[in-house]
Amino acid sequence: MTEYIIRGGKPLYGEIEISGAKNAAVAIIPAALLVDGVCRIENIPQISDVTLFLNILKTMGADIRTVNKHTMDIDCRGINAGEGPSEMMRAIRASYYLIGAMLGRFGHARGAMPGGCDFGVRPIDQHIKGFKAMGAEVDVMDGMIIADTPGGRLKGANIYLDVVSVGATMNIMLAAVKAEGKTVIENAAKEPHIVDLANFLNSMGADIKGAGTSVIKINGVDHMNGGFYSIIPDQIEAGTYLAAVAGAGGEVVVKNVIPKHLECITAKLEEMGAEIEERGDAVLVRRTKPLRSTNVKTMPYPGFPTDMQPQITALLAMAQGTSMVTEDVWDDRFRYVSQLSRMGANIHVDGKIAVIQGVEQLKAAPVRACDLRAGAAMVIAGLCAEGNTRIEDVHYIERGYENIVEKLRGVGADIVCVSSEPGDDKPAEALA
């Protein structure tokens, strides 16, 4: 077992470098399946989800060469079957992007239903709706997705998404770039990683217009050649560190960011009393006064991101006054609240709404990461709490945060990663 132990109460000072965007990387890597050549992808984050995706492609026959720790050459010309390794696909939510990519390249796809973090039902009906509109026959049976195109190639179509879905928007884009004719996605999601995927595909020879708006138009092409591409910085990683400083206090420059992508997050942090300064491709965050309460509602971009909801809830648990957080994207995303309550937080959840009465001080306690972003919230709470906080199930955190322990230690946090046996009360070996 691997755990984090945090001695809280220390303000943070210094600089933190942000890695490449997880949510872009897990779509861009399978998108390499569509390319008839070598893709050199830079700014790849070193996280477990990316490692798993690269191993999935290797298992399928891709030639992947490491240029440096953040740059890979990916050549998928050797893959000749539209079937992914089922057990590996079950381990990651974003594996559904393989279905769209395989359909686009081979006209058929077969793979396991995806896994990943479990915080409610996350259907893929809108993905399937898009595939069927382009001529695929899709069945879901015994935990498998089986899709075939009778004519061998998808055909462009007009597709209206019933709900704004990031995953469906990106998956339909992957399927459509080599379809015959024009595909139009209406009510499309607008997140930065959707734009990044479109830019990657366009740099390889695709013809996509409108990414970042509610209408995306894709003219199918016959071939896409290899090339170079650098993934954007991670909006949520940056937001998490900004929130950590807002909670623990201090002053940190968060580097390698796109400030525009962070406005939905920094606006709320400023409402709560943090000071934010944009510095080109960096953002300075400072907090010297007590946190103030505010209300937050998660929404599709450019609204407040659901992937930052647990982190800001951890902050609001220490803010003066009463706050309300409304989760309007995913069901059952407040499961982590019981962990914050163990640390003394006063939070009442009713369906999609959490009412938070701020407390003066959180107290250290043994807690667990329920999922990726909930785990980040536990880290923030531990940095602010009085005493030593032990966090279990940190493998969830490492799905999306590169070197989180080292980055926090670099700005003065007292955090170590330890390995221990189940039931141990003491760390067996400090790893960081």
Image (spheres, grey):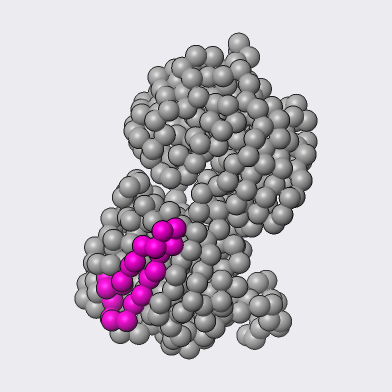
Q: Position of residue 92 (x, y in %)?
A: 60, 48
Q: Is residue 360 visible?
A: yes
Q: Residue furthest left?
A: 321
Q: Is residue 215 left or right of residue 418?
A: left
* Whether residue 145 is situated above or below residue 48 in the rendered picture: above
* Whether residue 174 is situated above or below residue 418 in the rendered picture: above
| Magenta stretch encompasses residue 9 | no
Quadrant of the rendering where the C terminus is positioned = bottom right
Q: Residue furthest top?
A: 151
- The answer to which of 425 and 226 lies nearer the viewer is 226
Residue in view at x 50 percent, y 53 percent: 233
Q: Position of residue 262 (x, y in %)?
A: 38, 56
* Whether residue 210 is situated above or below residue 328 in the rendered picture: above
Q: Residue furthest bottom?
A: 387
Question: Picture quarter containing residue 215?
Answer: top left
* Whether residue 356 is situated above or below residue 359 in the rendered picture: above
Residue in view at x 59 percent, y 58 percent: 399
| Magenta stretch encompasses residue 280 | yes
Which range of residues does the magenta coloring cover?
A: 272-291
Residue in view at x 68 percent, y 81 percent: 430
Q: Position of residue 228 (x, y in %)?
A: 63, 39
Residue in view at x 64 percent, y 35 percent: 227
